[in-house]
Image (cartoon, rainbow, N blue to C red):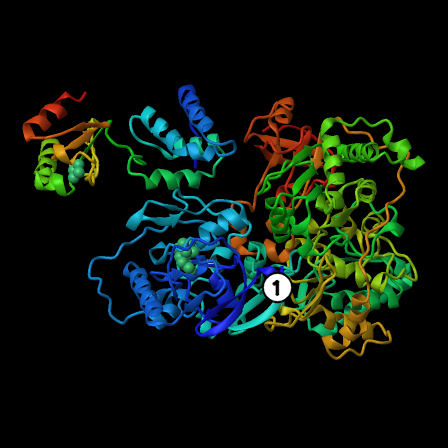
Amino acid sequence: MSDDRITIEVDGKPLPARKGQMLIEVTDQNDIYVPRFCYHDKLSVAANCRMCLVDVEKAPKPLPACATPVMDGMVVRTRSALALGAQKSVMEFLLINHPLDCPICDQGGECELQDLAMGFGNDVSQYQETKRVVKDKDIGPLVQTDMTRCIHCTRCVRFGEEIAGLRELGATGRGENMTIGTYVEKSMNSELSGNVIDLCPVGALTSKPFRYSARAWEMQQCRGIAPHDCLGSNVEVHIHNNRIKRVVPGANEAVNEVWLSDRDRFSYEGLYSEDRLLRPMLKNSEGQWQEIDWSEALRAVADRLKQVRERDGAGRIGALVSASSTNEEYYLLQKVLRGFGCHNIDHRMRQTDFSYPQQDGLFPWLGQRVSELELNDAILIVGSEPRREVPLINHRIRKAALKGARVMTINPLACDFNFDLDSRIVCRPSAMAHHLAALLKAAFDITGTEPANAVAALINAIECNEQHQHMAQTLIDSSNTGIILGDTVQAHPNRALLDSLVLRLAELTSAKAGYLPDGANSAGAWLAGIVPHRSVAGKPAAEEGLHAADMIEQSLSAYILYNIEPGQDCINPAALTAALQSADFVVAFSGYRSEELESVADVLLPVAQFAENEGSFVNIEGRVQGFKQAIKPAEEIRPGWRAWRILGNELGLEGFDYQSIADIQTDILPAIESTIPATARPAPLPASLPAILQTLERITLRPIYAVDALVRRGKALQQTAVAGIQGVMMNRITAEQLHIQEGEDVHIEQDAGSAVLPLILNESVADGCCYIPAGQPAVEGLSHWFGLITAGKAQN
Amino acid sequence: MTETTPQLSEHTKAEIDRWIKKYPQGQQRSAVLAALREVQHENQGFLTTGLMDAVAEYLDLAPIEVYEVASFYSMLETRPVGRHSISVCNNVSCMLRGGDDIIRHIENKLGIKVGESTADGRVFLKQEEECLAACCGAPMMMVDHKFYENLTTEKVDEIIDELD
Ligand code: SF4
Ligand code: FES
Ligand code: FES
């Protein structure tokens, strides 16, 4: 490295630099400002705006700092008459066609063009002719276009190609007639599309939901953590009059770099949904809902819980908890309940198979740091669609793929990856174990390792095909290998088996196996004791309670729902609803009221969501990230931890004198921070693999904008093309076997329930499978998200 | 987006394949210009969004990448135009030799302005051309890739009347 070092001189100061760096990188590092529009350090260099022209000695004309590699001894002047003259001329050119409509432009006050025009523009233009006007196109519900303002820097175009992996915007026409757009009327569908809003230096691309609602200088800014996925992207919340006006990325190289997924950016709208629960509500003896105050409500909850304990025992109470609440809420919740004698606490609402709990890792972690993902040279993705689950984790995987990593997947859906896959296996859910076993066998064969008896017994009879061999070989050959298990594995009826096979494969191929768990704070839920078998920091629970599925199946006397919407957030909604209906007492802590909750609950308690709340999350690499309350919630909505603290006192428990969130954090965070994430140990294997089903199998996963109550109410997100798909997807072969045609209604039966949905032909679904995206009201009658179903043409 | 992508003809595909072979492997995108030229030729001189989508699919490009190319080059038409295309040069040499008059004459004769096509779809009067490198024969025009030089209004009439 050392011979890479050179010295250049900028504005009279000697600066250290590395060979091959662009001049602008060196000046940026040394706080010397060079104006720019098209340059962005996360994008390739286009050098098309010419704003960064500087004066370089011995060069016959000004050179663009963003595209001029430094050389030893180079002498640069960024503010000489030549440089400033060039910059001013460029500015004049850029303003020729710019409408100068700052007073009605949303970018006003935070516009790079406006700022630089202040520094480099003239107050009079020599240009007298008519300016060009560009007709706007509607590119979807998230990004507003005002293309007359575009200065053709092509940042947005390069973003599409280089970061989003989806070329949606382009430069069509030429010369004066060049315009940036989609050319045809088409919406941007990238899950990262909102980032072009930040990238666009002018007001050509702005936020549609935010439009005309506040000025940059009127808003306060508060740091927050995005509440929808296990990455924990850092955000800045922009507030005006105690209302969130928009959410933008908070730069954090180690987590989200400078990006933000659309889900994290636009979901704040859900805070202002009409169906917010604003005050505690109690169902009176006539079944009427009435508003009461918090202390009454909590007293009522305490009384009812005590009654249940007296009559049926605390073991007949169960708490089903969201995977996106804070560590502090979790900690108090389990402290109250365990203190009260109730050990049935779980956040795994989308898990089916709970076997071998003693093998569970400390928490489902990524197996490596987030930033290390892009260094992997091979990645195997099992039962996961990272783009839908954690968009910015997908971005890291994509970066690895672009650097040459070989990415392979085994999935029941041939989901759309925005990079090239090395190989992919698409199979029905019940065949996934067989493919993993085949990979394992191939890996044993290739490495010449003798499998232990139990393993040998399981894999001996398996046939490996060429693809298995190839995939195993790739895993073995690569030196930095990652394996990722996603929501399909988590929900899978054979989760423990799949998990065990993957862990064994990882061990054999020295791969780092990791998970993409549900929600924003699964890791925190594990570490704060929101599982029936573990208390804080992974210590075994003093007494083991029931897990989520058992709590539902055993139809308990009382349920506590914590930020859960039964129809949407549970893998077996019908069973949960039945259990809730037959319970004596149900209290729901919720951000929202819904018919569903009102019909099953007895008490509704309004708890703070996202930026109304305060506390901390733990992400998949074990990073603890805290956030403050950014806005005061409306009416009687309160941060959940306060409710639990009072409830602790109401129930007569000791140790609930917390005055502030900081007091709770002193109790819990050191314990969480002292843990070291470790990969789970593989569970024992069964004697034989479960049979591959021959009849129709159901697959249900949550679409990107249906993962929690808040996003489901994000207005703009719900208008995107990917949201709100209604129907059942099958491939042509499956549909033909069932004699159903595209668009016809399919009658589906599962257990005792049935549903009618239109058929959507989709070749990415494995043979013999029906993919029913979650969140459709029509499927509420159906039961488990995975398993056997029957389907036929609906008779109308 | 509602229309389904039209199919490329076998002949077009063969032609595109021939061009693809001229470039290094994996660089099939380089054939986009040739492909568009061919497709336009078969489609009476202009491209539709559907046809561009078909080219994108065939060359494994994002549709917008094809739109960019098609809208950039003046020999590619992205809206319906007459089947014969006339471009009259208007650069210095031709201008000095009466190129402008030729343009006016054609406009009057056909009842259209530069950039328009006749209602019967017969002739498309393309934009004024900058020097087509036939200055010694100025004024000149190009009709369907063919140069006609030393034009007079009579000569122009004759040429245009001959078009089917
Ligand atoms: S829309 Fe904005 S980001 Fe895109 S090219 Fe124009 S000015 Fe640049
Ligand atoms: S920033 Fe250097 S040319 Fe645009
Ligand atoms: S100026 Fe007309 S051909 Fe050169």
Residue highlighted by disc 1: A252
Residue A452, quarter of the rendered image = top right
Q: Nearer the viewer, residue A92 or A302?
A: A92
* Mark 1 burial class by Cα count in 10 Å: few <14, some 14-19, many 20+: few
Tell me the quarter of the image containing the N terminus of chain B.
Answer: top left
Question: Residue A436, position in %: x, y?
Answer: 78, 36
- Secondary structure under badge 1? loop
Q: Is residue A100 visible?
A: no
- Residue at image point 60% right, 72% down: A630
Q: Is residue A216 visible?
A: yes
Q: Chain of mark 1?
A: A
Question: Residue A596, position in %: x, y?
Answer: 67, 53
- Residue at image point 5% right, 27% down: B154
Q: Nearer the viewer, residue A10 or A620?
A: A10
Query: Is A628 placed above or below A553 here?
Result: below
Query: Is A172 placed above or below A649 here?
Result: above
